[in-house]
Image (spheres, rainbow, N blue to C red):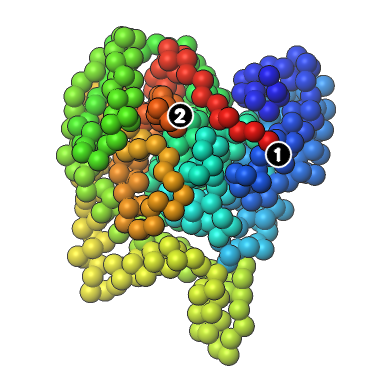
Amino acid sequence: MKLNELTIKEASEKLAKKEISSVELTQACIDRVKKVDPKLNAFLFLAEQSAMLAAKEADKQIANNANTFLTGIPYAVKDNILVKGTKTTAASKILENYESTYDATVIKRLSQAAPVMLGKTNLDEFAMGASTENSAFGPTRNPFDLERVAGGSSGGSAAAVAADEAIFALGSDTAGSIRQPASFCGVVGLKPTYGRVSRYGLIAMCSSLDQIGVLTKTVEDTAISFQLLAGQDEFDTTTLPKHVPDYTRSLNLDVRGVKIGIPKEFFIEGLDQEVRNIIQSAIKQFETLGAEIIETSLPNVPYSVAAYYIITPVEISANLSRFDGIRYGLSVAGKSLDEVYFKSRSKGFGAEVKRRIMIGSYASSAGYFDAYYKKAKQIQTLIRDDFTKAFEKVDLLLTPVSPHAAFKIGEKADPLAMYLEDVFTGPLNLAGVPGLSVPAGATESGLPVNLQLVAPHFQEEKLIQAGHAFEQALGLKLKPRLTG
Ligand code: GLN
């Protein structure tokens, strides 16, 4: 096995035993990126020099036996998360030459363990999209089929992990941006509870829904990497002072007697037959493992996409006003301040970003606020209540992640078709609950399909417990046949 193909667990054991060095491991990942990334476009920026320096430092720590699980492990970062001294573009022309002046809290927290930051990954511009086609720097291609999308918006992170360019990656998720690309690329993706992980240093899209999470090769790796991210942060007042359990402990628990709800609103007409079959056999697998399967309902979930595409644009129109051609990034000269704003934003933002700023400004304007934004927020409360009620009877919910496997590049040119991608993932963000996207099978043509596990607020350990038990029982090994 090549070093870049190792999991966090495997690599860190080999590092601890000094069978391999972080320099060798990092070099293997960098070589892989150079070989396959011209085809994939998963990375926007490869931090080769600083990664090799970090690997040398990690090796010193390991030599002194001062290492922990993540020491010397190469990882990739979605390019809307700030890493001091590196470019952070959010895949937008408006930030093309922007360099981060500080580390996001997640980067700081990870740094305590001295992992190796390999580079920044591609995304839909400002994380708006579900295919990475909205990136100003070209789409990321799916390692399982280069004609297809990697999903989005964290498509670069998902493809990088699936193609063994990075051992794990960070992503962000506002309505599915970690879980859906994880499904399209056959890796594990965790969207934590809103308030579990600090958003400080994440370029805001919809602040009330955004969460940072991890994309990994196994559920065990999710437990290991998520451990360091979770917890309160004084720089993000929406993080809560909740106890952070030892997530690796949940790996030893089985699912006997665990009550798993199957919400009927997720098994609708548009669900692809192959995906439906894969999810049905996953449900059977859980039954065989001793879980109790219970049919349940989340009656307001069908309104999530409509509510999301009001709430999100409203926050986007406010959050993105800071990109004015003066404070950050691209600036186009003009005769007046207004003209600088107008020209810089016209040139710097892509079509989807502009569309959302316009919809958001409209829906939050004085005459329309009550009819649109207020209504959407009321629906959000109903959806949240649906989850609370469901969790009175069950421990977890199980659903598909996406109605289908990865689609072809260019297939969803209509923005509304793209918005429907969030149909099964968005409800969790609106409710604030955590979700885990776990490989469950593949279509006949070899495209990965994941299932989604959902837990009550701050109970990620339940996701890890059930996800791990399922993964072990299934024994699925999906690897793209990427040559290069
Ligand atoms: N597809 C959704 C959107 O375009 C979600 C993206 C995300 O989770 N960042 O807004």
What's the residue type where badge 1 is placed? Lys
Residue 380 marker = none
124 to the left or right of 273: right
> Residue visible at 49% across and 50% down?
132
> Residue visible at 63% across and 55% down?
88
First-in-chain label (2 vs 1) = 1
Residue 35 marker = 1
Task: Look at the picture and state if 178 lies above or below 284.
Answer: below
> Residue visible at 46% across and 49% down?
409
415 to the left or right of 380: right
Q: Which residue is mark 2?
A: 446
What's the residue type where badge 2 is placed? Gly
Q: Nearer the viewer, residue 39 or 161?
A: 39
Q: Nearer the viewer, residue 255 or 451?
A: 451
Residue 277 found in image quarter: top left
How far from the left and from the top, in percent, is residue 243? Answer: 46, 29
211 to the left or right of 3: left
How far from the left and from the top, in percent, is residue 235? Answer: 54, 49
